[in-house]
Amino acid sequence: MSEAYVERLALAVQLPAFPGTDLPAAAARLLEEGLGGVCLFGSNTAAGTDRVAALTGAIRAVAPRAVVATDEEGGDVTRLHYDGGSPVLGALALGTVDDLALTRATGAAVGAELAACGIDLDLGPVADVNSNPDNPVIGTRSFGADPSHVARHVVAWVEGLQSAGVSACLKHFPGHGDTSADSHLDLPRLDAPLETLAARELVPFAAAVAAGAAAVMTSHIVVSALDDRLPATMSPAVLGRLRSTLGFEGVIVSDALDMAGASAGRGIPEAAVLSLVAGADLLCIGPDKDEALVRAIQAAIVEAVRRGRLPESRLVDAAARIAAMPRGGGVLASFEDAAQLAGARSALRVEGELPDLSGALLVTVETEPNIAVGVVPWGLPAEPAGGVAALLARSAGRPLVVQARDAHRHPATLALLSGLAETVPVVLVEWGWPGPVDVHMVRVVTQGSSLPSARAVAELLRARGWRP
């Protein structure tokens, strides 16, 4: 095998992202040389779907077989609707409603929009079982905490998405749901025994692989029962289990290699080599990268082949799996706004009895979003909450409606709610995972943010007298 061919393959396995809504000249050069594809993030989609379609058209004009991917999970995680919020329900809301037809239709609606924009790989759905309520990065992105329940909905969502001709990518193998750290910032550990992995984490992945999911994304977590040293993305033992035990023959996609769980202490190029050696095929690099990093990764891969660290056959196999990934040919589904709104209403849970909200003040407690979600609109438009004293002065004895995300994980939020509830009626609208909150107040659980959920909450509050 010539070195020039190896250099081309070392580009073919990369899925970087570049800043901006237009195709940079440097990215076009890489695509001409065989770059595997491009992953679109918020900076690429901010100008709307027409510009996204123009961007993907420019990519395909240079490289017709390039993969164009994005994270479009619905609900909290959206790239196509980064500035306004997703028009479809997220996973937890769909899992709460527990209507597989609605879940399948939602996947199909997402697939239809992606296909219309020229995107052929969706980095979703999340197949993690969110068994840890303190999980800082999965939460409402999961269909729930029960493995068989999650499996049914993951399969339905995959079926809907792929019916539109867009490949699904299950994430984050072998399961990121029982962790209390964010792999964007740290290296989480999953210390469950193999029996628990088989009965919990692997159940949704096995079901969706059997249903024909085209791709699976790895997680940057240490799974001690399989490999006590390397994160799953770089562990032959973990990724080998995906191939051998689950029988998966599609494309293994790494989670973004710029995340601390992958590259901290070793650098992105070395993380890329280790991922390929372990069995990953397509390397997601992370948002807004430049040509120099892609070239550095390319050089590291070529050097690894030259030194015998990375077998040529492994690189050839990875590129072949990417080339064989299904593209297009689906049936475009119509989007049913009424069904999404009905689902949002059904997903709402009210804990306690809502008081009269005539004259109630609506405020928002802002907390740092997890990086996977990003800085996107959530909830209803409202002023920042501020401190207890200032907020009580503003309310002047009126009821307070406080919006928050994952209130149970933020001591400052809990302290604010407790201080307010001692003086005035407080309604907490929880837009995140509904963990335990030991404060005497009414709680409205939305199961995640989306435009339909926001409308359903507004209806609920208005019915009790609230006016924006």
Image: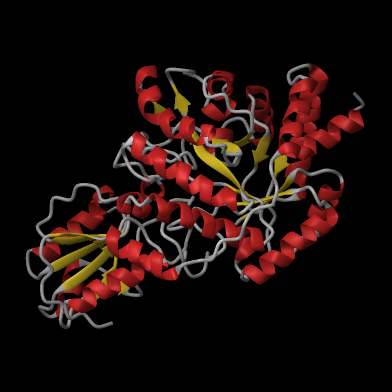
Q: How many marks?
A: 0
Split into 4 quadrants, where in the image is the N terminus?
Answer: top right
Residue 68 x %, y %? 69, 51
Split into 4 quadrants, where in the image is the C terminus?
Answer: bottom left
Asked where in the image residue 319 lies, by quadrant, the reply is top right
Tell me what residue is drawn at x 67 percent, y 37 percent.
282
Residue 111 x %, y %? 57, 56
Q: Is residue 467 left or right of residue 288?
A: left
Tell me what residue is drawn at x 44 percent, y 33 percent.
175
Residue 386 x %, y %? 26, 69
Tell me what residue is drawn at x 72 percent, y 30 percent.
318
Is residue 373 among what the camera can see?
no
In this rendering, the answer to whether 222 lies above or below 364 is: above
In this rendering, the answer to whether 60 lies above or below 395 is: above
User: Which color scheme does this rendered protein use?
Assistant: secondary structure
Asked where in the image residue 440 lies, by quadrant, the reply is bottom left
Q: Is residue 137 left or right of residue 163?
A: left
Asked where in the image residue 89 lies, by quadrant, the reply is bottom left
Tell me what residue is drawn at x 76 percent, y 38 percent.
323
- For this rendering, which residue is in front, 409 or 120? 120
Is residue 44 among what the camera can see?
yes
Residue 325 x %, y %? 69, 40
In this rendering, the answer to whether 34 lies above or below 237 is: below
